Image (cartoon, rainbow, N blue to C red):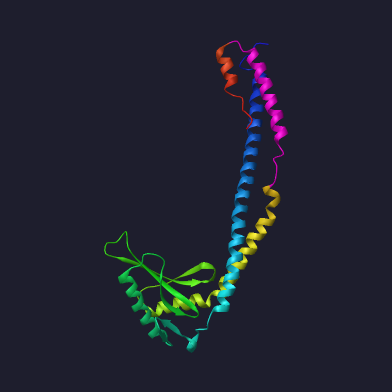
Amino acid sequence: KALTTNDPRLIRFTELKQELERANRRKTAFESDVYNTRQNRQKAAAQIEHYDQRIVATKQDIKQRIDTRADAFKGTVGKKEFDTRVDFGAALFERIGEVEDGGTLKGGIKVATVGGFDIYATAHKSNLIKDHTNVDVFMALNGNATREVSFDTSSLGTVRSIESILHGFEHDLAEYQQRLEKAEKFFKDSKDKSNAKFEGAAEIAALQKQVDDLAAELRASAETPAQVAAVDDGPAMAQ
């Protein structure tokens, strides 16, 4: 039978191609979802390991911490011990100023000890502002962790920042435990989804065969190159 523009086989051919395209889109979406789930599971596994370590280290921080609340405050700068925040803060600022003037090449320089933890400072020339030195101050914690100390124009504000870190260990621990539980739950709940197999392969294969068979029939009925091109322009291919 010769091919005409109103041939019902052309309409059916178009419908089959659309069905095949939709099926292939479903497959692509499914595979993308599985891939993303697997990637997120890898991240969750890394988070589980990280938060496990942070929980252990933070419990050590809590055990190591020396109370600094109210009149119990004590801090050391160099070899000198202070029992008031004002005097400690002034000495700390002076020591940090010395680090700022001298600069540091690697790591940090110990500038103080307070609450059972060492405070370090680093100083390096700014790449953005001429004749300006950037100073970073941090507390060294267990598990090779550090916590930034807010260092500004107020010495007392810097001391408050240090004590805020010390007094925040319990909050940190609760936060790590909550994040660990969330990561563990996702890792457990997503196992089946990460191993899921696409179940529409047979449907795609059947649709592809119908498209291919009908395309061959239409090409055989075509009488002009334009009619052949109309068929060849269309067949959706399985992915």
Image vertical order of residue 239 relative to residue 115, above or below = above
- Magenta region includes residue 183: no
Q: Quadrant location of residue 205?
A: top right
**Vertical placement of residue 142 versus 39, above or below:** below
Q: The N terminus appears in which quarter of the rendering?
A: top right
Q: Nearer the viewer, residue 65 or 192?
A: 65
- Tell me where residue 125 sits by quadrant: bottom left
Q: Residue furthest bottom?
A: 71
Q: Nearer the viewer, residue 211 or 134?
A: 134
At horizontal 59% and vertical 64% (from top left) the residue drawn is 51
Residue 35 is situated, as x and y percent measured from the top left of the image, at: 62, 45
Q: Is residue 30 shown left or right of residue 67? A: right
- Foreground pick, 231 / 169: 169
Q: Is residue 12 left or right of residue 160?
A: right
Q: Is residue 211 rendered magenta in the image?
A: yes
For the view shown, which residue lies furthest in the left direction? 131
Which residues lie in the magenta part?
195-223
Would you place residue 59 above or below residue 84 in this image?
Answer: above
Q: What residue lies at 57% left-to-right and 72% top-to-bottom?
A: 58
Residue 77's place in the image compared with 208, above or below, is below
